[in-house]
Image (cartoon, rainbow, N blue to C red):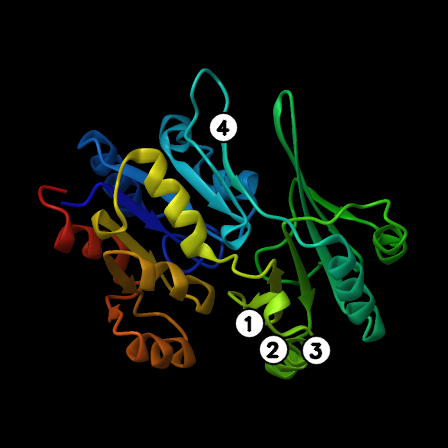
Amino acid sequence: MIKLVAFDMDGTILDEESRLSQESLRTIERLLERGIAVASNSGRSIRRSQEPLAPWPDVASALYVGGYNGGVAVSNVRDGRRRLLHEERLDAELFRELVAFSQEDDFNLICCLCEQDGDGLREAYRHSHSVDGLEVFGGPGFVHDEKLYAHCLSGEIAAPPKIMMVTGEERRDAVIEAMRARWGERIYATWSIPDRIEIMPPHVDKALALRALAREVGATLEETLAIGDGDNDLPMLRAAGIGVLMGNAKPEVRRLAEDAHIEVGPSLEEEGFSATISRYVEDV
């Protein structure tokens, strides 16, 4: 029996304009009505994960949230706030090395800042260059900092859970290989949007957040269903009792999914999220 459903956001339940379909919304509502725990588990920050659900605050507050590609996991809203379930940050010295590496090629560096205080989480995406024209960028929480490199290298900005480098799709794979050759298992580098790399601490991925979320709701991994569409979703799909890759996944991701024996379902355009839930969860 499925006790936890975890899903990626962009390309899984959200279209290119971060819109949630009415069918996906109804499916999430039916899962919650059945008493099944539901969690978004994405590369987004916690706040960014909630933004597409703002028109439906009851649904948004009922969801558990994994963010920063598994670096942070929080509970659903209880007594007006979320509890931190899990957190991982980049090593401070490694963070400075990565910043210097990015500065050498003058990539648009994005630091995904997440700090806990007495009132909850304070988050911001600080970026070194303009984000005009970049996919799924902009809006509240994005701060252009022309001196970001200096602020990071001086220690003024502490090591965050995740950073991103906008390399362009044509250079992405070569830059990832260069990073892996230099730092090896000291980093986890992946991508979900083709023009940028996401870098987290080693051993951090969406499977880590999935485990924390499953423990919180009293489910085993065998009792979880996970759905995603990107390279960064594969660890979560492998760890879940049932892992399903969306039909709109990139060809290279589909090939990796086949190697991991992950099922490929319908696409976003075919309401693949809802179709997958209907297949594996009774009466939803």
Q: In the figure, residue 164 lies in which quadrant? A: bottom right
Identity, as a three-letter code, of the amino acid under mark 3: Arg
Identity, as a three-letter code, of the amino acid under mark 1: Pro
Q: Which residue is mark 4?
A: 83
Q: Earlier in the sequence, mark 3 or mark 4?
A: 4
Residue positioned 42% across, 20% down in the render: 78
How crowded pointer 4 is (Cα within 10 Å; few <14, some 14-19, many 20+) is rated as some
Residue at the far top in the pictured view: 79
State whether residue 280 appears in this view.
yes
Q: Secondary structure at mark 3?
A: helix
Of badges 4 and 1, nearer the viewer stands 4
Q: CA distance from mark 4 to mark 1?
A: 32 Å
Q: Which disc number belongs to residue 194?
A: 1
How crowded pointer 3 is (Cα within 10 Å; few <14, some 14-19, many 20+) is rated as few
Q: Which image quadrant: the C terminus? A: top left
Report x, y in % for residue 229: 38, 65
Q: Which disc number belongs to residue 81?
A: none
Identity, as a three-letter code, of the amino acid under mark 2: Glu
Q: Which residue is mark 2?
A: 169
Q: Which residue is mark 3?
A: 182
Q: Earlier in the sequence, mark 2 or mark 3?
A: 2
